[in-house]
Amino acid sequence: MANLSLPLILLTCLASMAALISKGEAARAFFVFGDSLVDNGNNDFLFTTARADAYPYGIDTPSHLPTGRFSNGKNIPDIITRRVLVTGTGPLGCVPAELALRSRDGNCDVELQRAAGLFNPQLVQILNELNQEAGAEVFVSANAFDMHMDYITNPQEYVH
């Protein structure tokens, strides 16, 4: 039951937003549904030892100063505007914590990768249906799985 509640809540929210947006109405807000792979944000105001407000964070930003974000580049929300961005899940089997628990050779966990492969296409299909109902391209899906797998399999392409 608990496994079904989060997807149902997400779909209810998406359907409600689709109903509120008409074809000719300009977008008034920007919503992002996803996890830290989408927008890693910052925790500058939280009491924690996990910080991103010191070197080396920020070395690739224009000011070369840490911003508090756990990223030195732009995230998907920085690029796409005036839409509701919904990301599928990233490569769950490659998350460092899962690699530590499940992998003896450093390879991504096949079972978790398969779960992401089942979920993501269904999410895209639902978003396409919601766009048809809204009569506009309101919902944008981002393929976090492929983006992150490209980074994992071709890290040399991301070296400055």
Image: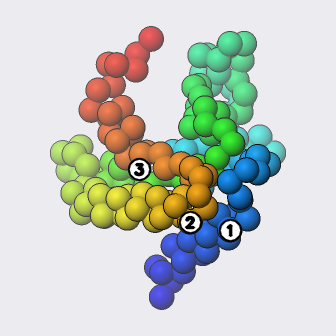
Q: In the picture provided, is 58 more to the left or to the right than 107?
A: right
Q: Where is residue 27 in the image (x, y as percent from the top left)?
A: 74, 47
Instruction: Name the residue that disc number 2 marks.
Output: 133
Q: Which of 137 and 31 is in front in this view?
A: 137
Graded by Cα atoms within 10 Å as few (under 14), some (14 to 19) or many (20 or more), the crowding at tag 3 reads: many
Tag 1: amino acid: Ala
- Residues under labels 1 and 3: Cα distance? 28 Å
Picture residue at 37% right of the left edge, 46% below the top: 145
Picture residue at 26% right of the left edge, 49% below the top: 108
Q: In the picture provided, is 114 more to the left or to the right than 25?
A: left
- Residues under labels 3 and 2: Cα distance? 27 Å
- Quarter assignment of residue 117: bottom left
Q: Is mark 1 on a helix, strand or loop?
A: helix
- Quarter assignment of residue 41: top right
- Residues under labels 1 and 2: Cα distance? 8 Å
Tag 3: amino acid: Gly
Which of marks 2 and 1 precedes in the sequence?
1
Tag 2: amino acid: Glu
Q: Which of 97 and 150 is in front in this view?
A: 150
Picture residue at 56% right of the left edge, 71% below the top: 11
Is any part of residue 159 visible from this angle? yes
Graded by Cα atoms within 10 Å as few (under 14), some (14 to 19) or many (20 or more), the crowding at tag 2 reads: few
Q: Is mark 3 on a helix, strand or loop?
A: loop
Contact (Cβ within 8 Å) of mark 1 with mark 2:
yes
Which of marks 3 and 1 precedes in the sequence?
1
Residue 65 to residue 52: above or below = above
Q: Is mark 2 on a helix, strand or loop?
A: helix
Instruction: Name the residue that disc number 1 marks.
Output: 19
Graded by Cα atoms within 10 Å as few (under 14), some (14 to 19) or many (20 or more), the crowding at tag 1 reads: few
Q: Nearer the viewer, residue 158 or 78?
A: 78
Instruction: Name the residue that disc number 3 marks.
Output: 90
Q: In the picture provided, is 140 more to the left or to the right than 96?
A: right
